[in-house]
Image (cartoon, rainbow, N blue to C red):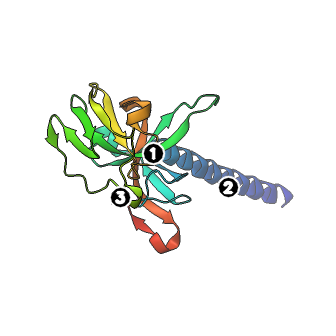
Amino acid sequence: MEEEKAKKSLKAFLEASFFLFLAVALTYFVLAFVGQRTSVSGSSMYPTLEDGDQLIVEKLSYRFGEPKRFDIIVFNEMEAGKKEPVHYIKRIIGLPGETVQIIDGKIYIDGEELEDNYGYYMNQEKMEGYDASEPVLVGEDEYFVLGDNRNDSLDSRKIGCKNRQDIIGKAIFRIYPFGKFGGIE
């Protein structure tokens, strides 16, 4: 009788351990290869995203396809004095092989003005030093990224084009604040 109870307890323990292991492995797989949660820090993507917004970043589509113009991406950037990379959130503007130039707040891709409905300037003022008046050739495995809040964004105008391997994924869904819960434009 006692031996039978011990076998049942061991079986229950092994089953619970297996399901716990399976849950941890599945969670790791999802976070490593499918998606993750990230927070917006700062106002560089205002008004699209705001400081404190919580997002879901989808990683899978860029394993099978290329990032597209106007995608909002999360990428790693090494900041001076930091040991770990910091996640930046920006919008893709220039694609590999294109030439990007910004004059008086207008973006030109290969000499043609880009219809950009995302760029925002505080008080409608285009600040000095925030253009890229010299043409920037985007490398074959790189992307030119900008924050939507063009007056308050550390982006490709200052940190250069971002390499494809530094891109973590595409921001697709806002989970907080609850009043803005849903997909990201």
Name the kind of residue labelled 2 in the image. Ala
Kind of residue at disc 1:
Ser
Sequence-earlier tag: 3 or 1: 3
Specify whether 35 is left or right of 120: right
Residue with the mark numbered 2:
16
Q: Which residue is mark 3?
A: 124
Q: Between disc 2 and disc 1, whose residue precedes?
A: 2
Residue 121, horizontal then vertical, whole percent: 37, 55
Q: Which residue is mark 1?
A: 153
| Residue 164, quarter of picture | top left
Q: Give how far apart the Cα atoms at labels 2 and 1 are.
A: 49 Å
Q: Secondary structure at mark 3?
A: helix
Percent of width and height locating residue 72:
37, 49
Please tell me how crowded label 1 is: few (under 14), some (14-19), or many (20+) other residues with Cα within 10 Å. many
**Which element carries disc 1, helix, strand or loop?**
loop
Of marks 2 and 1, the one in the foreground: 1
Quarter of the image with the C terminus is: bottom left
- Please say whether residue 65 is visible from this viewpoint: no
